[in-house]
Image (cartoon, rainbow, N blue to C red):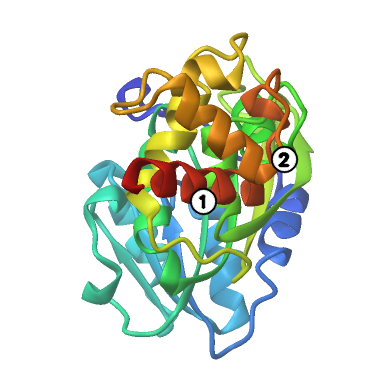
Amino acid sequence: MPKRRFSQNFLTDRTIAERIVSFLELRPDDTVLEIGAGRGILTEIIAASGARLYSFEIDRDLMENLNNKFAPYKNVAVINRDFLAILPDEYTAEKFKLIGNIPYDITSPLLEWMLRFRESITRAVITTQKELADRIAATPESKDWAPISIFHQCFFDIRKVLSISGGAFYPPPNVKSATLLFSANKKHHIPFWDDFERIVRQSFHQRRKLLSNNLLRLPGMTRESIQAAFATLGLPANIRAEQLSIDDFVGLTKAVLSTKNA
């Protein structure tokens, strides 16, 4: 039976499972990390591809069935561990692909994990609650554009590839799900990441406020220094955070740092 403490909703629709795995574009020489084997519906499809698979499952009560099911596959290791506690280099020195159907309550920690190990991830297919997926894949000047969109789109091209109704899971969740495809990119080089992250988060601190008013809460910032930064970038005084692209935020961070160091 699914366990509430693990927020388990098992995918049961084989057709959807095959579509989800197809977005990994697997080759036999790939290495894949799976977040939560569950009953093994995705695991089985990945195993058949010949790719090297490390599948992590936190629920020890599922392990006997999983071990029996995948014992014939020499390319599969099913491991009873909390995925969020692992270090990829414990299992592979290669770059890898990532897949999982993620409970809402661990999606944010997982996204932080992905940022931490972003240099090793070539592709990821993540299914989560649709509302959160919309925010992760959002674009500038939309109501969903937020720090969570910006931070991950700095390193991945992200698009929503599937919408999934509750009936595809057991037990059926009360919300719709969506599958996101993350493809690694090298579009943005941000050597001042800590400053960038702090400025982006503060920019969205109160979404309805002007960007300039939010930035005033940063240590050392004055209206004059903000005006100087805006002038450097050609930004209007009445702009709001959701109107800025990633490149705009990179430029803003550079401008803010230069005015503070002047």
Residue 252 or residue 30, whichever sits in front: 252
Q: Provide residue 111's location: percent of width, then percent of height.
A: 44, 45
Question: Mark 1 and 2 residues: CB-CB less than 8 Å, in contact?
Answer: no
Q: Provide residue 220's location: percent of width, then percent of height.
A: 30, 28
Q: Provide residue 105's location: percent of width, then percent of height.
A: 40, 27
Quadrant of the snapshot with the N terminus: top left
For the point 32% across and 84% down, the residue is 93
Q: Is residue 44 left or right of residue 164?
A: left
Q: Is residue 70 left or right of residue 172?
A: left
Residue 232 or residue 238, whichever sits in front: 232
Residue 104 visible in the displayed image: no
Residue 152 or residue 76, whichever sits in front: 152
The residues bearing labels 1 and 2 have C-alpha atoms spaced at a distance of 42 Å
Q: Which residue is mark 1?
A: 100
Badge 1, how many Cα within 10 Å: few under 14, some, many 20+? many
Q: Provide residue 148's location: percent of width, then percent of height.
A: 52, 36
For the point 38% across and 56% down, the residue is 192
Give the amino acid type for the residue marked by disc 1 in the picture: Gly
Viewer-nearest of discs 1 and 2: 2
Q: Which residue is mark 2?
A: 234
Give the amino acid type for the residue marked by disc 2 in the picture: Gly
For the point 42% across and 29% down, the residue is 2
Describe the element under mark 1 as helix, strand or loop.
strand
Q: Is residue 104 above or below residue 137?
A: above
